[in-house]
Structure formats: C-alpha cells, structure tokens
Image (cartoon, coloured by chain):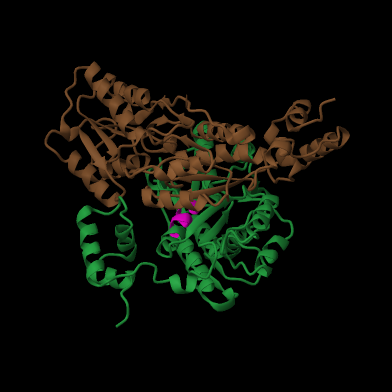
Chain colours: A brown, B green
C-alpha cells in the first residue's frame, strides 16, 4: 500500500491540501473542529510528514530566494503569497530580497546567494540595463533560477509570463472603442520585456484603428514620484489635452486620480483611465478603476512549482520554456462611455 | 583631517545621504547630472566607501532578517522600505521572512536563523499564542532582536511601537463626537499587544462618554476572509443596527465597503467607518476612508537604526527600551457628520 500523503488526506477529508498542511501545523487559520478531524485521520492512516523528504533532504538549505524589485506593489505581494503556498507544502523557507530596481543591488544579492544558502532562485528582474553575468553565474553554480513577470532575454531557463502585449492591445482597443482619440501611455523607462511588450501592444492597437502615434503620447516615468506627478500634470494641462491615460505602472493610476482632482478634470467624462494593477481597492475607488489584472498569485505558484520540479530532478535540470498565464481586462467606470 | 563620509558628501552637495549612496552605486533613481556631481566631489575629497566597515566587518553575514506576518498589508511594505533605507547605507542585505501569523512557522524561522546566517533580527510578532522560547534562544545565541509594532511581552529587548491605545481612543472619540452611539469594533482574535491596546482605547472612550459596551459590539475576526465578510454582514443586518464600524484590521475596511454596497447602506449617512490603515488609495475611495495612519516607514527606520547600533557595540548589547512613534488620525468623509 502506498503511504498516505497530504494529497490523500485532503481527498479523504474533502478539504484542500493547504488546509490539511495548516491543520497539522496547528495554524490559526483552521478551526479546532477541522484540526481534530485532520489529526484523527492522520493518526488512523499513519501519516508521516514530509513525503518530499527523500528527494529534497539531499539539498542543503531547504530554502529558496525570491528576488523582486519591491513589495509595495500589489503584483509582488500577491505573487509572494502564491510562491509561499507552494513552498509551505514542501516545508521550504522563502527568503525575500528587494532590488529596488537597482541592477547593482540585484548583482550583489546574486553574489550573496552563491554561497549555497539557497537551493534555487525565483526572480522578477530589476529595470537597470547592465550585464546579466550575475544570473549566468548562479546557473553555473548549479543554482536554478526561474523568472516570473520580468525576465532578461538570452538566459536559458524557465519563465512564467503573462500576455503583456495582448493585454495592452486589449486595453487600448477598449479605450478607442469608447471614443478615445488621444491616449497617453505611461511607462517606465526600461528595456525590460514588460515595458517593451506593453508599449508594443499599445502601438498595435493604434495602428489597427488608424490613429497616428505622436511622441507626446508616451510619458516616460522613473522612480521619482514627485517628478512623475509633474509629468502627468504637464501632459494634462496641454492645449491638445489627452482624452485617456493608459498606465502600465500601478501606482501612477493613483497619481493620475490625484492630478485630475487637483485640476478639476472629471473621470471618465473628460479623461478615461485604465491601469495595469492588482490593487484590492480598485473597485471601491471614486470612480471605480478599470484594470488589467495580472494573474499574480497564479504566476507565483507556477514559478515555484517549476523551480521545485527542477530541484527534485537529477542535476537540477531546468527547461528553457516560457509559460504564459493570461491577464484579465476588468472594465469599470473610469474608462466607461461618459453619460 | 577626518576622512570624508557619505554624510559629509551629502552636506556639501546639499542632497540626502541616501541620494549620495544611490549615486555612487549608479542607481536608476538618480539623474546622470547628479551622479557626475557626486562622483566628482567623491574623487576630489578622496572618499572611501563603507565608513562603517571598521566596526561591522567583524560581523560575519552582513545580513539582517525581517520576520513579519505578511507583505500584502501596507503597514509592512512601508516598514520594509524604512528598514531598507537604513540597511542600504550600511551596505547590509535584508532578508524578509513571512510567518503568515503562524507561531510554529515563526519558531521554525528563528531556528533557521540560529546558524549565523544573519547578524540580527527585526520582528513583528505573529498572532499565535504559544511559547516564546524561540525568541529567547536567538538572544542566547547573541543574535539581537528588535520588535516593531507587534511584540511579545516579557522579552528584554528594544521595541519600536506606536500609541495604539491613544489612537484607538481618539478614533472612537471622533466617531462619538460625530453622533455615533452603537460602534462596532473589528479586531483579530489575539492576545498580541496591538489588539489588546486598541481594544483598551476603544473601551476607555466608551466609558468617558457613558456608552455601555455590549458584547455584540465586538466582532472577532480571523484569517478567513469569507467568514469575516459573513460576520460583518450579519452584524449590519441586525435589528439594532450599528451606526459605525471601527476596524483595527486594514483589509476589513474594504470588506465593510463591499458589504455596505451589497446591502445598500450609505457611508457615512447610515454607517460611519474608520480604520487603522496605511493604504495609499484611502483618500481616493468612494467615499474617502478615514484612517488611523501608523508611522510605518519611520518605525521601520527606527527599528533598523536601533539594531545597527547594537551590532556596532561590544557584545551586541541591546537596551530594554520602548520607543513610541505616534500615529495620526486622518478624518475623511467616511466618518464625517452626515449632511
């Protein structure tokens, strides 16, 4: 008879694997009644914890690193939750390192990770455009790395992406179909895939609808929030005022709302807004914010799953593949046809 | 002549220390012009990096750990930014570990940290009510720990707190002065200081204004969001409907807005709302959300500063002190006198 594992316990109890795992670790999230049921069945079936132990105990650290630009962004906090949901089942520690969009810092972190303190790395690349030697060095040291959302081209490893180009195309098309003829596109200055892909999608939609692209429609932002606010204010005070803003940066949507309030610009009557965002309050804003929602939790889960599959393999082999989890356009009042 | 340090460079250039540090590390946040100015002066004055090196190089890891319940909460993402702003000046790595409010996990993380992979720990305690042996063990291993926001009583170390009791008193008084007579208090079931202190402040305000406290006014939430939503819905559908909700949990404010929308309850006319929250979109919500804003960034900065002071001392001595950084009540439309 196969020994019983978490999955088997979960199936027999009719609850999720993660609930069983939490119940066995006496988590606060699980009711005492459920804990009793789980423990009773685990005893009855002689459940032994850590079924992955045989393959994973040979690894040294039982730890993976997550290297990301920041945590204040909702995409990353949700992705972390997805990653942790998988790591927890494996009884792995997750270390989070922040790069603050600084490639020098990203390189220093990777160097720090070479010492064997982690078995593998999940990374969403920072914006800087310097060399990627630090990534190659990790791979040379047999530390597998999986990219999610933001990746460096030319590195042979697994990448968990979303359909940025199509999503940006869809969001732009949505604005055009709601009458917009002069759409501003807010983007970060960077050669990162997410920036170029989203810009590409924006341009393609303009071409499809025969709208010429003027240089002034592209607002390049950086990490200086005050400057970004000035850039948006200046753009909205032009003679030829834009009738929509499509922001590829989550927090710039809030900045745009603030500037509109300050200048007395009505959303959506005078200006329509849509934004790449995983903000949990988007639907409660005034007016509710239209978003392109990335599958952040799911992408984190997939990235961690791919990494653990590699760690369980001989030689930690990782395939050079790209998995695409699509984003969702959620149209709300901020981009709706004005009444 | 004293050798020049970051502070000296910053003073002469008239920019912040962190900008100088970023410029020298070639960060994207700094303009090319500023970088040139910083580098020129650094060369001229023969600046040598890492002035802290003499005392800190003796430490092994150049790494500190931040152990917190989650990152989806804005308090923690801001506190992390405060911590990193200090760690960056010291050229230290920051590892973030998440406990998901699970004391067993917190204990496992602390055990993991005993191996000397970090020089010190910053912690915001998880809610579980088990023993604190894992904390004592870190201290016994000469790994200093500084608590911020949430602490375990009885542990002799530094604590960076905010004035939870006074803030909760102030928020409750604000609701009472705006006419509320039946205020619900949303709280997490936990014996943690932040919960007991906020509840204390709530009770004190009721006493001051001669309002009896009924058991039904206290809504105890847990980590199950769906159940919490049911609890709020049930409370708002009672015969003796509350006229205000004071939430000590950030995300329950959004849940309350959602339930009100579903039940057709008008904010603030039928129900006033105030919440402990650092949400960046609070002022853009419909209606704008009144908040008690904790000094999250500042608390993170202070906690890191106290920890680094300890690491620079012989024997890593850390004083048993409590530093209180006050929170701010920001009254907005959600708790205003109805028109």
Q: Is residue A20 magenta?
A: no
Q: Is residue B10 left or right of residue B274?
A: left
Give the image location of residue B185, x and y in percent. Answer: 59, 51
The part of the image, by quadrant, that contains residue B87 is bottom left
Label count reads 0
Q: What's the magenta region?
A: B75-82
Q: Quadrant of the N terminus of chain A?
A: top right
Residue A150 seen in this snapshot: yes
Q: Nearer the viewer, residue B88 or A103?
A: A103
User: From the viewer's perspective, is residue A260 above or below residue A208?
Assistant: below
The main secondary structure of the magenta stretch is: helix
Q: Nearer the viewer, residue B266 or B255?
A: B255
User: From the viewer's perspective, is residue A252 above or below residue B33?
Assistant: above
User: From the viewer's perspective, is residue A115 above or below residue A6?
Assistant: below
Give the image location of residue A310, x and y in percent. Answer: 59, 33
The part of the image, by quadrant, that contains residue A267 is top left
Give the image location of residue A12, x and y in percent. Answer: 79, 26
């Amino acid at each position: 008879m196969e020994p019983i594992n978490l999955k088997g316990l979960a199936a027999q109890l009719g609850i999720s694997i993660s609930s069983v795992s939490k119940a066995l670790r006496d988590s606060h999230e699980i009711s005492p009644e459920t804990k009793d049921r789980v423990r009773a069945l685990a005893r009855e079936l002689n459940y032994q914890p850590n079924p992955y132990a045989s393959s994973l105990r040979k690894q040294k650290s039982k730890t993976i690193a997550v290297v990301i630009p920041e945590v204040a962004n909702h995409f990353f906090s949700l992705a972390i939750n997805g990653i942790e949901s998988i790591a927890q089942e494996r009884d792995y520690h997750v270390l989070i390192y922040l790069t603050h969009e600084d490639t020098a810092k990203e390189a220093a972190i990777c160097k720090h990770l070479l010492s064997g303190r982690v078995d593998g790395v999940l990374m969403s690349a920072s914006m800087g455009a310097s060399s990627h030697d630090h990534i190659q060095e990790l791979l040379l040291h047999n530390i597998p790395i999986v990219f999610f959302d933001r990746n460096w081209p030319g590195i042979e490893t697994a990448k968990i992406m979303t359909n940025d180009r199509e999503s940006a195309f869809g969001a732009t098309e949505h604005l055009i179909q709601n009458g917009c003829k002069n759409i501003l596109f807010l983007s970060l200055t960077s050669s990162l895939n997410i920036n170029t892909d989203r810009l590409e999608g924006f341009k393609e939609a303009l071409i499809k609808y025969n709208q010429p692209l003027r240089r002034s429609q592209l607002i390049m932002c950086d990490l200086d929030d005050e400057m970004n606010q000035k850039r948006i204010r200046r753009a909205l005070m032009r003679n030829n005022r834009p009738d929509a803003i499509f922001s590829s940066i989550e927090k710039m949507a809030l900045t745009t709302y603030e500037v509109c309030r300050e200048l007395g610009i009505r959303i959506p009557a005078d200006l329509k807004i849509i934004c790449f965002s995983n903000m949990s309050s988007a639907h409660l804003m005034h007016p509710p914010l239209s978003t392109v929602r990335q599958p952040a939790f799911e992408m984190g889960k997939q990235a961690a799953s791919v990494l653990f599959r590699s760690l369980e393999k001989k030689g930690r082999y990782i395939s050079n593949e790209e998995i695409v989890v699509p984003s969702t356009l959620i149209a709300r009042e901020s981009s709706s046809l004005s009444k």
